[in-house]
Image (tube, rainbow, N blue to C red):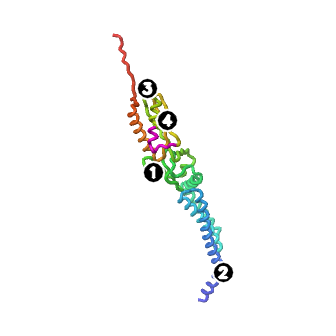
Amino acid sequence: MDEVKRTIIDFITRYAFQVIGAIIIFGAGIVLARWVGRVFQQWLDRLDLEPPVRRLLVNVVQVIIVAFTLVIALGQAGVPIAPLVAGIGVVGVGIGLGLQGVIGNAMAGLLIIFTKPFRVGEYIDLLGVDGQVTSILLFSTTLQHADRSQVVIPNRKIIGEILHNYGSIRQLDLTVGVAYDTPLDSMLAAVREVLSRNPRVLKDPAAVIGVSTLSASSIKVSIKPWVAVPDYGPAQAELYQAIVEQFRVQRIQMPYPQQEVRLLSSPG
C-alpha cells in the first residue's frame, strides 16, 4: 500500500505541472480558435459568399487551430511529438491518395467561390449542359434546367472548361416570315408594339429587330428581345402568339413555302 502511494505521489510530482500546462495550452487554443473564427467570419461577410460556404471555411480554420494546439499540448504533457506527427503525415498521404477526387472538387470549389466566374441565379452553359445556378457548394454546383430537372456538376469538371455565362438575362431569338409585298415599316412597327405590350420584355437593353434573310417565298424577320432568365420559356410562346394575332389584325400575310412547277410537254 505504501508502495502504491509513493508511486502516485512520484507520478503527480513528476507530471502534474506538465499535465496542467497541457490543459492550459489546449484551453487557450480553444479560446483562440473561437476568436479567430469570429474575426474570420466578419472578413468573409464582406466577400458576399454563400452562408454555408462561409460557415464551412470558418470551421476549417478553427479545426486547424485546435489541432495545432492539441499537438503542442500533447508535447507539453510528455507525449513524443515526432512519431505522432510522422504517423499523422503517413495517414494524411494515404487519405489524400484515396480521396483525390474529393480533394480536387474541394479545391476547385474554393477557386470558384473566390474567383466568382458565376453566381447563384445566373444562367450558364458548359460541358454540354445549361441551366440556372441554384447552389454553389464546396464539392459540386447545381443547375436547374429549363424542364425543372437538376444537373449536379462536380466542381473539378468546371475548372478549365469553356464557360458561357448568360448572367441574369437572356436574349430570345425569334424568326417570322412575311410576304414580299408587305410594307416593312408597318410590319416592324407592329412587332415593336407587341414587344412593348409584353411585361416580360426588358426595355433595357433594347430589342434587336430587322430583316435577316430573303428566302424563296418570304422575308425572314429576326426578333431578339431581352428577358429575365425565368421568363425565357414563357416569353417566347407569348410573343409568337401575340405576333401572329397582331399580323392577322393588320392583315400582314405570313406566306406558306411555295414552289412553282412547270410541266413542259414534248412535241408529238
Q: Is residue 201 magenta?
A: yes
**Label 4 vs label 2: CA separation?**
89 Å
Q: Earlier in the sequence, mark 3 or mark 1?
A: 1
Q: Earlier in the sequence, mark 1 or mark 4?
A: 1
Magenta stretch in the rendered image: 193-203
**Label 2 vs label 3: CA separation?**
107 Å
Q: Is residue 137 magenta?
A: no
* Disc number placed over residue 181 in the picture, else none: 3
Q: Residue furthest top?
A: 268
The three-letter code of the residue at mark 1 reads Gln
The three-letter code of the residue at mark 2 reads Arg
Residue 148 in view (yes/no): yes
Q: State the residue position of label 4.
A: 209
Q: Earlier in the sequence, mark 1 or mark 2?
A: 2
* Disc number placed over residue 14 in the picture, else none: 2
The three-letter code of the residue at mark 3 reads Asp
